[in-house]
Image (cartoon, rainbow, N blue to C red):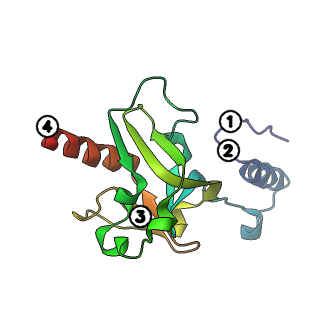
C-alpha cells in the first residue's frame, strides 16, 4: 500500500479520495467514478449591510482591527450602493455604527452593519465585468442577494476620486 503525501493544499475529502484511488489500484481494480470526491474551493467573506443592501468582501482583503494611523480615504458606506439603488435607501436604514478597513490601511468604510463571515464558492458568484457606474462591484450573489466588492477596484476608485478633488 502506498502512502499519500500530505500537503496543506489538499482538503480532507481530496486526501480520502486519493487514498481510496491508490488503495483500489493496488488491488488491481479501477477506481469507481463515484469514489472520486471533489470539493469546490470556498472563499471566506465578510458580510455587511448598507440599509437593506448586503455586501460581501473577501475576508483576507479586510483588516481585523482598526489601523493605528488614520486612513487616507474615509467614505460613507452609502457610497458603495450603486446610484440606481440609492433611492431605495431610507435615512433611518443607513444609521449603522460599524466600519471596515481594506488591507493596506488606505480606505475606511463607515456606516455599515456587520453581519459576520460566511463561506461562498466561486460558482455561486455572477461576475459583473467592467462597469463605469459602480466599478467596485466585481460580482453579485443570488442567494442571499448581495453585491460582492472587488477590494482592489474599490481602493482604486475612491483613491482616484480623492486625487481628482485635490
Label 1, residues with CA under 10 Å away: few <14, some 14-19, many ≥20: few
Residue 29 figure quarter: bottom right
Q: Which residue appears at 50% of the width and 44% of the height?
A: 100
Q: Which residue appears at 73% of the width and 35% of the height?
A: 5
**Left or right, residue 118 beside residue 103:** right
Pointer 4 or 3: first along the chain = 3
Residue 153 coordinates in the image, percent (x, y): 32, 49
Pointer 2 or 4: first along the chain = 2
In the rendered image, the quadrant that contains the C terminus is: top left
Q: CA distance from mark 2 to mark 4?
A: 49 Å
Callouts 2 and 4 close, C-beta under 8 Å? no
Please name the residue that numbered disc 3 is placed on: 139
State which mark lies toward you, 2 or 4.
Answer: 4
Q: Is residue 74 above or below residue 149?
A: above
State which mark lies toward you, 1 or 4.
Answer: 4
Task: Say the numbered circle drawn on residue 7.
Answer: 1
Residue 120 coordinates in the image, percent (x, y): 59, 60
Pointer 3 or 1: first along the chain = 1
Task: Choose between 112 and 39: the one closer to the eye.
Answer: 112
Residue at the top extreme of this rendering: 68
Amino acid at each position: 500500500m502506498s502512502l499519500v503525501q500530505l500537503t496543506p493544499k489538499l482538503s480532507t475529502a481530496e486526501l480520502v479520495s486519493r487514498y481510496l484511488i491508490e488503495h483500489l489500484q493496488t488491488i488491481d481494480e479501477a477506481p469507481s467514478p463515484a469514489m472520486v470526491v471533489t470539493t469546490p474551493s470556498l472563499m471566506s467573506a465578510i458580510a455587511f449591510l448598507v440599509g437593506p443592501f448586503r455586501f460581501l468582501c473577501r475576508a483576507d482583503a479586510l483588516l481585523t482591527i482598526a489601523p493605528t494611523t488614520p486612513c487616507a480615504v474615509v467614505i460613507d458606506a452609502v457610497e458603495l450602493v450603486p446610484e440606481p439603488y440609492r433611492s431605495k435607501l431610507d435615512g433611518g436604514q443607513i444609521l449603522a455604527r460599524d466600519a471596515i478597513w481594506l488591507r493596506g490601511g488606505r480606505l475606511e468604510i463607515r456606516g455599515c452593519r456587520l453581519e459576520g463571515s460566511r463561506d461562498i464558492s466561486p460558482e455561486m458568484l455572477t461576475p459583473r465585468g467592467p462597469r463605469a457606474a459602480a466599478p467596485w462591484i466585481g460580482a453579485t450573489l443570488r442567494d442571499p442577494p448581495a453585491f460582492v466588492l472587488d477590494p482592489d477596484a474599490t481602493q482604486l476608485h475612491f483613491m482616484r476620486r480623492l486625487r481628482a478633488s485635490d
